[in-house]
Image (spheres, rainbow, N blue to C red):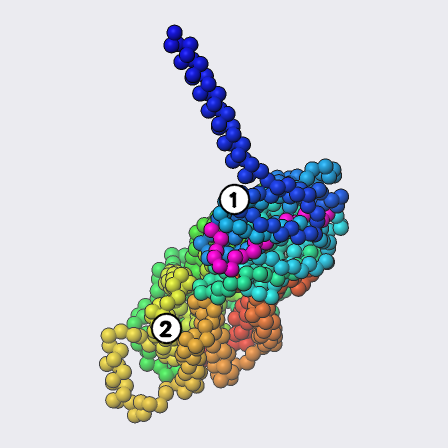
């Protein structure tokens, strides 16, 4: 009896609960029913909204929406009494997708609020019908009334044309992008971006497909990108973007990505931009430019091979059976000839071939004037073998040094190609021509190729040295002993400088700058050692010791780049000045000065026993060396006041300056000794000075700087200046290679005037 009654009651309660819930949902949904409005372009729609109201704005696509896409702009009116707690939510559904944002717009970890935002709706370039609509939904959870203004415009001049300069403003909440298609017979174009302010932004190149990534969170996902402060640029190929591309501009909420260290923050983040697309050289023109340089170099090589012949009349004839007399100034000293058997058992471990070397060394140390014959007692084959050790040591170092370098820079280039992050490498983006070689794509091929000058002139100098060595046979009676091992090492170092510089320019940045300068240190040191060896053949530095010192120099340079603190510079300055004084003493006493525990005693004996201890024994040499010491002291002091770039540059400047000082000292001492300079060394000196001056001009006008941030480095970027393919730094490569070659030729021919002069009359200095 109770069972039917209970079933009836349960059924009525279920129906009542369903009706009640439907009524509740119906009443609740009445509060959220959106207000639908038909919108018109270029018209403001000011509305008041809260959590009980939402709006739907409907817009039709225009006929030319692919050429002039719609741009949705929403402005939030900031209340005067309080801030907005719950943001305004804007959702736009359009033909190619859905985008959304909120106002106020707040960047991550930033306190700046933006009450205005605008976004361009991505056009579907392949769609021709206009049946779909644009639906803009505006809602909020705010309990208080919020006033906003909605406006939809068309983006004028969306399609960019060649040589058409575009100018506009943008902010972090209002990104902008444009479309470019390769339809104007230009397979390679240069995008050049300029701005008058320092506000940081990201420039992105993306495929002409939707969606467009135009926010800081998403812009790094696809395409090429780079940070830009005042100048930016990208060379783009039609092969990479056959259907066209989008040029996207996104402003950062601060400048930390563009500037190193402390940067000036600003509340106004509106950036003014202008850019232009210019046609640039294509692949065929690049190939022609490279072939022209190669043909010129090959022509020089062929001409040198067939037409360069050393002058036989000035070269020495074989005569190694007699030992030359040793002279003190102009007074000859009769020395018994040394009975040495010249067999093949001699090797480079022999340090003296005289029967009683110690008396000879004691005699040499007591002489007031030394001549080359005094310091050329060893067998020429031993000295030749020792000299050749420089080449083999250099080749060994080059192989072990270059292999990891090549692997590192190729990996960096691969990472850049895969990620599109062009901040990894510090190119001159206004003149960086890409080149595809098999599986490898080089982003800056012109700066890699321009290093061919170092390789070519290094090999050319080796060829000239070989031809000269073949024509020049040893003679211990006349001229200066000719040992070409150091010349071969110098030519090899020049070629390796080209290879290492090319590796550096694959992806130049602060992590691999030492690749570009390591062999410049070697070239400078080998050149100074060669100058010293010329008139000190028997007491020249050991090859192993030299490369050990060079290893220390490279470690010191790397340490200075990684840590440029005052402590390191103080220690280096002390070491630098100590070495300068020690080397000056070696040159002043012609290698007869020793620094040991008896040095203070010898100095005290000289002060107490010499009739005039303050008067220098060699006044000319003292004056020249004092000038060199003062110049080095001035460089050390000047670096505290005027920074010579980074520590690596300062170290290279010291090497170059001291090489110039030593060469100048050598030439002046030749003239003081009544020796002459022939026509060819004079010509090489003149040409070297001209080319070095031109080289320094292009080096100073640099087009990038790895010591700055990537965006700051781009402020130095300049367009191509020669053949629409090479910039100032490429010209520096060519001219400096010629300058180094001419400098080597100066050293090679500087003493041709004493070839027929007796060795016993050639002074040592």
Q: Secondary structure at mark 1?
A: loop
Could you tell me how far apart the alpha carbons at marks 2 and 1 are, in whole angstroms?
71 Å
Give the farthest residue toward the bottom.
611
Q: Nearer the viewer, residue 212 or 409?
A: 212
The residue at the point 65 percent across, 59 percent down is 168
Image-based side of 89 in relation to 393, left or right = right
> From the viewer's perspective, is the residue at label 2 or at label 1 nearer?
1
Q: Residues within 10 Å of mark 1 (few under 14, many from 20)?
A: some
Residue 406 in picture, x, y percent from top left: 49, 50
Q: Residues within 10 Å of mark 2 (few under 14, many from 20)?
A: some
Number of numbered labels in the structure image? 2
Q: What residue would you read off at disc 1?
A: 51
- Compared across the picture, whether 501 is left or right of 4 comes to right
- The residue segment tinted magenta is 67-85
Looking at the picture, tell me which residue is in the foreground, 688 or 287.
Answer: 287
Give yes or no for residue 759 being in the magenta stretch. Answer: no
Query: Whole-percent x and y of residue 624?
Result: 44, 83
Q: Residue at x 68, y 43 (%)?
A: 38
**Quarter that holds the C terminus:** bottom left
Q: Tell me where residue 496 appears, x and y as whole percent.
A: 51, 57
Instruction: Read off the residue under disc 2.
Output: 573
- In x, y percent, where is residue 237? 66, 49
Q: Is residue 78 magenta?
A: yes
- Residue at x-position 41% and y-position 12%: 5
Quadrant of the image containing the N terminus? top left
Decide which of tag 2 and tag 1 comes sooner along the chain.
1
User: Does residue 619 appear anywhere in the picture?
Assistant: yes
Residue 471's label in the rendered image is: none
Is 599 located above or below residue 407 in the figure? Answer: below
């Amino acid at each position: 009896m109770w069972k039917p009654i209970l079933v009836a009651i349960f059924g009525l309660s279920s129906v009542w609960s369903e009706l009640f819930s439907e009524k509740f949902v119906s009443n609740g949904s009445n509060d959220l029913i959106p207000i639908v409005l038909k919108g018109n372009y270029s018209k403001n729609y000011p509305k008041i909204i809260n959590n009980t109201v939402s709006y739907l704005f409907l817009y039709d696509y225009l006929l030319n929406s692919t050429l002039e896409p719609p741009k949705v702009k929403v402005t939030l009116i900031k209340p005067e009494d309080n801030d907005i707690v719950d943001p305004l939510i804007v959702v736009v559904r359009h033909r190619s997708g859905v985008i959304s944002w909120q106002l106020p717009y707040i960047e991550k970890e930033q306190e700046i609020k933006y009450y205005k935002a605008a976004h361009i709706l991505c056009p579907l370039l392949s769609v021709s019908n206009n049946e779909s609509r644009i639906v803009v939904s505006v809602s909020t959870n705010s309990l208080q009334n919020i006033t906003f203004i909605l406006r939809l415009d068309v983006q004028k001049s969306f399609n960019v044309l060649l040589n058409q300069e575009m100018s506009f403003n943008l902010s972090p909440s209002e990104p902008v992008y444009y479309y470019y298609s390769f339809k104007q017979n230009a397979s390679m174009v240069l995008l050049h971006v300029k701005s008058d302010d320092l506000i940081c932004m990201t420039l992105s190149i993306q495929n002409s497909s939707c969606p467009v990534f135009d926010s800081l969170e998403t812009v790094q996902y696809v395409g090429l990108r780079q940070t830009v402060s005042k100048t930016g640029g990208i060379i783009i190929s039609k092969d990479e973007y056959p259907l066209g591309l989008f040029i996207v501009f996104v402003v950062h909420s601060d400048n930390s990505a563009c500037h190193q260290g402390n940067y000036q923050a600003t509340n106004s983040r509106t950036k003014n931009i202008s850019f232009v697309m210019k046609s640039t050289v294509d692949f065929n023109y690049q190939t022609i430019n490279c072939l022209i340089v190669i043909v010129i170099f090959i022509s020089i090589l062929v001409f040198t091979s067939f037409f360069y012949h050393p002058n036989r009349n000035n070269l020495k004839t074989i005569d190694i059976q007699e030992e030359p007399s040793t002279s003190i100034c102009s007074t000859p000293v009769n020395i018994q000839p040394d009975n040495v058997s010249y067999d093949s058992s001699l090797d480079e471990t022999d340090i003296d071939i005289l029967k009683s070397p110690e008396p000879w060394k004691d005699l040499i140390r007591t002489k007031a004037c030394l001549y080359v014959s005094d310091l050329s007692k060893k067998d020429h084959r031993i000295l030749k073998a020792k000299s050749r050790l420089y080449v083999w040591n250099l080749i060994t170092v080059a192989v072990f040094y270059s292999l990891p370098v090549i692997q590192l820079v190729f990996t960096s280039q691969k990472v850049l190609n895969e990620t599109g992050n062009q901040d990894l490498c510090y190119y001159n983006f206004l003149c960086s021509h890409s080149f595809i070689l098999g599986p490898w794509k080089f982003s800056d091929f012109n700066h890699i190729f321009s290093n061919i000058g170092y390789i070519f002139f290094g090999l050319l100098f080796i060829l000239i040295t070989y031809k000269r060595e073949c024509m020049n046979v040893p003679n211990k009676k006349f001229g200066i002993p000719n040992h070409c091992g150091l010349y071969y090492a110098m030519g090899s170092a020049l070629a390796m400088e080209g290879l290492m510089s090319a590796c550096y320019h694959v992806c130049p940045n602060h992590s691999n700058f030492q690749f570009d300068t390591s062999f410049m240190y070697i070239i400078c040191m080998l050149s100074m050692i060669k100058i010293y060896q010329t008139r000190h053949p028997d007491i020249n530095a050991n090859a192993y010791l030299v490369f050990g010192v060079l290893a220390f120099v490279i470690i010191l340079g790397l340490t200075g780049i990684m840590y440029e603190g005052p402590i390191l510079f103080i220690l280096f300055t002390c070491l630098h000045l100590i070495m300068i004084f020690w080397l000056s003493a070696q040159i002043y006493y012609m290698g007869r000065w020793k620094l040991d525990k008896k040095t203070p005693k010898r100095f005290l004996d000289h002060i107490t026993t010499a009739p005039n201890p303050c008067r220098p024994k060699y006044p000319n040499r003292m004056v020249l060396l004092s000038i060199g010491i003062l110049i080095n002291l001035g460089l050390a002091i000047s670096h505290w006041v005027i920074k010579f770039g980074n520590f690596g540059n300062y170290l290279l400047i010291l090497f170059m300056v001291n090489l110039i000082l030593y060469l100048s000292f050598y030439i002046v001492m030749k003239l003081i000794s009544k020796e002459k300079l022939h026509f060819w060394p004079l010509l090489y000196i003149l040409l070297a000075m001209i080319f070095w001056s031109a080289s320094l001009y292009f080096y100073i006008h640099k087009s990038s700087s790895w010591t700055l941030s990537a965006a700051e480095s781009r402020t130095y970027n300049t367009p191509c200046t020669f053949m629409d393919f090479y910039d100032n730094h490429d010209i520096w490569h060519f001219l400096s290679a010629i300058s180094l070659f001419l400098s080597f030729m100066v050293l090679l021919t500087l003493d041709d005037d004493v070839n027929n002069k007796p060795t016993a009359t050639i002074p040592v200095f």
